[in-house]
Image (cartoon, coloured by chain):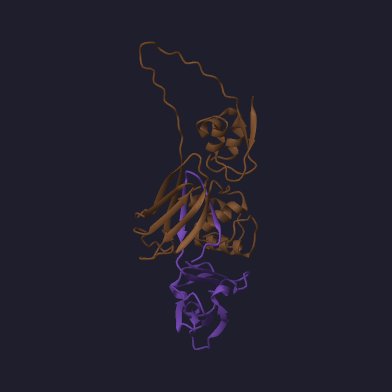
Amino acid sequence: MTQQHTVTQGETLLRIAKQYGYQTSKALYNHPSNAEFKALRPDLNLIYPGDKITIPPKKEKFIPLRTNSINSFVVQNEKEYFRLQVSYDDGDDVAGKRVVLNIGSQTIDTVLQSDGLIEVELNNNDVLTGTVDLYLHEGETTPTKSFNVQIGNLDPIETLSGVQGRCNMLGFNCGKVDGVMGKKTRIGVKEFQYEHDLDIDGIPGPKTKAKLQQVFGS
Amino acid sequence: MSAPHSMPMVVNNINPLTMVKPAFIFMYQVDPNTPKYDKEQLILINKQHSWQQVQSIASVRLDSTWVKIKFTNIPQSGNFDLMQDPNDGQPAYYIFDNVPFSELYKQTPETVLMAEIVEE
C-alpha cells in the first residue's frame, strides 16, 4: 500500500528510503509518484522539513535461477558521505592544518591537503551530528576554531535559514541560523552582495540567492 | 576561539567552509565627486596595545560608491578608535572612539555604513 512520508529536520532521503525497506535514495526519488517532489527539490541531497514523499509499495520480484550454475546477485548498497572543504578567505594554503572530526561514532584526526577537502563515509546507523575542530596554528593543543555540524540540516536556498547557513559557511557571518532577518543577517548578506558585485541592500532576493547557490555549490 | 553556532550542512555534496582571519571589516559609501576623495585614510587605533593600522581608500577596490576597508590581525581585547583622515590638510575626525572589541561590529549606522568584526 502506498504511504506518504513527511520529512522532518535532519532526515536524508537515503535514510527515509531505508526506513521503508529500499536500498537506494533514487528508488524513491526517481519513482513516478514523486515527480512533483523531484521538481520541487532538484538536488536529492537537499530536502526540507515538511516535504511530502510518496512511498510506493514494494513489489516482489521473481527471478528465474539456473540449476547447477552460479547465480550472481548484486546488492545495491548506497553510502552517505560527509564532505567538507576548508579554505582561507585570503587564499592562503590550508595544507598541513590539523582537523579533528567527530561524526556519530567516528573520530577522524587528519591533516588537510592543499585542496582542503575531507571526505568521511557515514555509518548507516550513526546520528548525523558531530563536531569539527580546526587547529590552524602550529603546536596548538586546543582548537583554534570548533563548531557543531548538523549533516542533512542545510535548508534549500529558497529559505532564509538556507541563506544564513550558506553565508555562514562562506565566511559572511549571519549569526544564528534561525530563519529570522536580524541585523547580523542583513550585514552578512550585504557583505556577500558586495563581494559578488550585487546590489547591496541586505535583502536576499532572487539574484543574491542564485549567486549564493552558485558559490556554495548546493 | 569562537564556536557560536551549529553549522547546518548538506549530505554527500561538498560543504565549502571559508575560514576568515581575524579582521575588522568596515564598509562605507564615499562620494567620488568630492575632490581628492581617494586620498582619504581610515585609521584604527587601540591604545591599550599601542597598535594602529592605516588603510587608504585608494588601496582598496571601489565598487560604485562602496568601499570595503579591512583591518587585519587586530588585537582581540582593549578599546578601539576609528578615525577618518581626509589627508588634505583638514583635521581628522572620529567615526567612533573607545569601543570595546566585543562591540566593534555594532558601530556604524547600517543605512549607510556597516561593519563586522570577525575572529578566529
Colour of chain A in the image: brown
Q: Position of residue B40 (x, y in %)?
A: 49, 80
Q: Position of residue A43 (x, y in %)?
A: 53, 41
Colour of chain B in the image: purple
Foreground residue among A156 and A64: A64
Q: Is residue A175 above or below residue B70?
A: above
Q: Position of residue B107 (x, y in %)?
A: 59, 74
Q: Is residue A173 above or below residue B52?
A: above
Direction front: furthest residue: A105
Total marks in image: 0
Choose top left, top right, bottom left or bottom right for residue B101: bottom right
Q: Is residue A123 left or right of residue B98?
A: left
Q: Is residue B16 left or right of residue A176?
A: left
Q: Is residue B59 visible?
A: yes
Quadrant the N terminus of chain A occupies:
top right
Q: Give the residue at x 49% y 82%.
A: B45
Q: Position of residue B4 (x, y in %)?
A: 55, 62
Foreground residue among A218 and A96: A96
Q: Is residue B113 visible?
A: no
